[in-house]
């Protein structure tokens, strides 16, 4: 019996190490008898493979079967809590460790400190460290505590801990350098490297130089990056894979693709990180074709490779390509993660095709990502932009731990659907939940007030933004206010506001607010002010934007100044600027039909005009100007 149990446990470990974790779990489940060693073997396998959710689930099952955990059990389980950053589960496991009397074991204590450090609770990590006593601490204990402070950004205390260490081992130096690297503090990283070399106690390794290059990448400092790269070559670490990948990532992020290609071609043996860095570099440059070529050449593609390409297509306005690639990814048996779903939901939002969005939502549920706030935010935004505000609201309510992005997405959703009452209610709830609105929140509020004609509310929010929350006004805030006042006929106030905040602004900022004001002048037929605004706009208009030219031309025509209108149109031609035609689209049975202004070639145009004519009175009926959800 004991011999058979040992053989099966050994087989579970062997299968797990060979990558057959599903088969190992099936064998585990089929075992009629299990001891703590068998449970620990399965727990450890999950933990080592990074399957932390499965590890925690197995631990709970172990507790349910009344199998007594030991110090190996707790070490693996704490590692799972650390990997997930699950403070709640970590504290529960810590409580069980005390209850079972395993707090005197060194590996368990080190795992406790590591767990609190990765859960961003250095205070609890220090408390566990102090409770150990000096006699049983080792280098791992000190490094775990040091990491807790560096990971939470408490570098002053990290430095104190660092210099208190009985022996500053290489891992400790790397923890400090990596901590500063994540904050883009290149100079501090270099200073630590100098101290490290002067101390002669240890020498930098590939992780040291990888962190240094990552610091340069975070800071986007090209000069420092080249300096560190030169030093790496001089000291002889340029051929190490981790260092090579960090160098490649640096040049790719800074869009120095010529240098990145040379580094890539000199690697010889490529890793997955190398291929992903090249894909990401081309995408950042907007060169989606070369990015896809690299993607196709990559011998292996992981979830990061697929997600980078999907996000690249989505950001470059190629939503259909993003969807096609997502389908290929799922068919290739690569499991999407939360970032994949965020990218593909963005693509669905851009396409505004509800059928595709629902399909992706089904995949979200199938893969178990509906509880992730990042994915939930994407669903709120997608449904709102696809015209289904009810489902957008449902998706918002299903987000358990809403962040500011969640509230802003719902606020914008209600605002763009003309539901001003609900939008303002969301703002009140957001503040009641302790969320501090940011600049994006106020853009949503001002847009809502503008479209709903809530002038006094809009003025109040605009003043509140600076006086109560200390936020500075940007282009969009001023343009929203000018648009709101202009729509309501407060043209003088709108012009004063535009002039006040446009004095120190860029050409883009000036043209944005002037365009809003000029549009309002055209709506209200105020030719005198329109001519004045037109003169200001002519000095600041972006030569490649069609909006300024179109508004100028329309105003000139409205005031009977045909010659001036002809001059504006000729300037458009001379600058090579073409007026973007207005268009709309409708989705029927997952097929999108686009209607372009001026195009009367649709085969069902007569029927469409009849329906539109019958709907026109209904749309203008004030009784149907808003609705509840």
Image: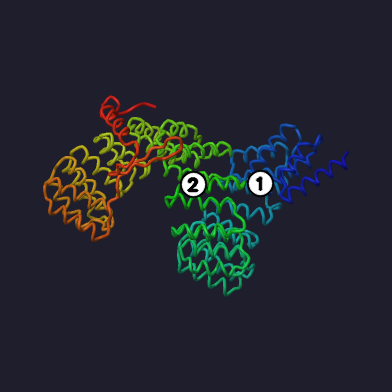
Q: Is residue 322 left or right of residue 96?
A: left
Query: Residue 429, position in %: x, y?
Result: 40, 32
Q: Residue 365 location in percent, x, y?
A: 56, 36
Question: Residue 4 shows which numbered tag?
Answer: none
In this rendering, the answer to whether 228 lies above or below 35 is below
- Expressed as whole percent of the image width and height from the top left, the position of residue 67 reads 76, 35
Q: Looking at the image, what colour scheme do you see?
A: rainbow
- Per the image, label 2 sits on a secondary structure element best described as helix
The residue most toward the bottom is 234
In-image side of 438 versus 256 (left or right): left
- Count of numbered marks: 2
From the image, which quarter does the C terminus lie in? Answer: top left
Pointer 1 local density, CA inside 10 Å: few below 14, some 14–19, many at least 20: many
| Residue 173 left/right relative to 409 | right
Question: Does label 1 or label 2 sit earlier along the sequence?
Answer: 1
Q: Quadrant of the image for the N terminus? A: top right
Is residue 122 shown to the viewer in this render? no
Q: Residue lying farthest top?
A: 623
The residue located at (28%, 54%) in the rendering is 578
Please say if the residues under marks 1 and 2 sit with CB atoms less than 8 Å apart. Answer: no
Determine the CA span between mark 1 and mark 2. Answer: 30 Å
Whether 500 is drawn above or below 458: the answer is below
Give the label on residue 79, or none: 1
- Badge 2: few (under 14), some or many (20 or more) residues near its Cα, within 10 Å? many
Label annotation for residue 343:
2
Q: Nearer the viewer, mark 1 or mark 2?
A: 2
Residue 232 to residue 545: above or below: below
Q: Residue 583 in the image: x percent, y percent?
A: 32, 43
Residue at image coords 36%, 26%: 628
Name the secondary structure under disc 1. helix
Front one among 537 and 592: 592
Q: Judge by depth and name the residue closer to the eye, 501 or 595.
A: 595
């Amino acid at each position: 019996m004991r011999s058979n149990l040992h053989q099966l446990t050994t087989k579970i470990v062997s299968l797990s190490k060979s990558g057959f974790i599903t088969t190992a779990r099936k064998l585990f489940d089929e075992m009629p008898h299990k001891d703590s060693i068998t449970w620990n073997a399965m727990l450890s396998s999950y933990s080592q493979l990074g399957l932390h959710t499965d590890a925690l689930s197995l631990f709970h099952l172990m507790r349910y079967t009344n199998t007594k955990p030991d110090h190996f059990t707790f070490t693996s389980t704490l590692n799972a809590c650390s990997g997930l950053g699950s403070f709640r589960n970590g504290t529960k496991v810590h409580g069980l460790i005390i209850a079972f009397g395993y707090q005197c074991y060194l590996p368990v204590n080190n795992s406790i400190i590591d767990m609190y450090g990765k859960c961003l609770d250095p205070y609890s990590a220090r408390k566990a460290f102090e409770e150990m006593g000096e006699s049983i601490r080792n280098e791992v204990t000190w490094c775990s505590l040091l990491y807790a402070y560096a990971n939470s950004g408490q570098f002053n205390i990290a430095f104190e801990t660092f210099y208190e260490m009985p022996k500053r081992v290489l891992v400790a130096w790397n923890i400090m350098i990596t901590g500063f690297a994540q904050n883009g503090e290149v100079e501090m990283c270099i200073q630590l490297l100098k101290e490290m070399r002067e101390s002669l106690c240890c020498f930098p390794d590939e992780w040291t130089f990888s962190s240094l290059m990552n610091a340069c990448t975070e800071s986007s400092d090209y000069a420092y990056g080249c300096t560190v790269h030169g030093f790496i070559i001089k000291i002889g670490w340029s051929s190490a894979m981790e260092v090579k990948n960090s160098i490649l990532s640096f040049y790719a992020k800074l869009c120095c693709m010529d240098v990145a290609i040379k580094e890539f071609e000199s690697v010889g043996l490529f890793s997955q990180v190398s291929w992903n860095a090249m894909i990401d570099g081309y995408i950042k440059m907007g060169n989606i074709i070369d990015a896809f070529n690299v993607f196709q050449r990559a011998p292996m593609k992981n979830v990061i490779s697929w997600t980078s390409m999907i996000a690249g297509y989505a950001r470059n306005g190629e939503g259909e390509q993003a969807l096609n690639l997502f389908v290929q990814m799922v068919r290739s048996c690569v499991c999407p993660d939360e970032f994949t779903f965020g990218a593909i939901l963005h693509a669905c939002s851009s396409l505004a095709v509800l059928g595709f969005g629902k399909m992706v939502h089904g995949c979200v549920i199938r893969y178990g990502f509906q509880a992730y706030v990042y994915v939930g935010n994407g669903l709120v935004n997608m449904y709102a932009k696809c015209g289904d505000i009810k489902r957008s609201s449902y998706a918002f309510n299903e987000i358990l731990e809403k962040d500011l992005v969640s509230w802003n997405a719902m606020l914008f959703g209600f605002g763009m659907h003309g539901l001003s009452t609900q939008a303002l209610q969301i703002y009140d709830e957001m503040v009641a939940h302790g969320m501090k609105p940011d600049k994006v929140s106020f853009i949503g509020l001002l847009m809502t007030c503008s479209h709903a004609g809530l002038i006094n509310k809009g003025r109040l929010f605009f003043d509140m933004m600076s006086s109560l929350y200390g936020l500075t006004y940007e282009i969009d805030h001023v343009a929203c206010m000018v648009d709101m006042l202009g729509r309501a006929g407060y043209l003088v106030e709108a012009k004063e506001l535009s002039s006040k905040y446009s004095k120190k602004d860029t050409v883009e900022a000036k043209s944005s607010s002037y365009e809003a004001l000029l549009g309002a002048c055209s709506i209200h037929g105020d030719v005198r002010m329109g001519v004045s605004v037109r003169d200001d706009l002519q000095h600041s208009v972006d030569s490649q934007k069609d909006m300024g030219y179109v508004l100028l031309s329309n105003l000139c025509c409205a005031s009977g100044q045909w010659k001036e209108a002809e001059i504006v149109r000729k300037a458009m031609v001379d600058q090579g600027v073409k007026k973007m035609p207005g268009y709309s689209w409708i989705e029927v049975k997952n097929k999108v039909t686009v209607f372009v202004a001026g195009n009367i070639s649709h085969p069902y145009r007569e029927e469409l005009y009849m329906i539109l004519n019958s709907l026109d009175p209904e749309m203008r009926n004030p009784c149907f100007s808003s609705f509840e959800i």
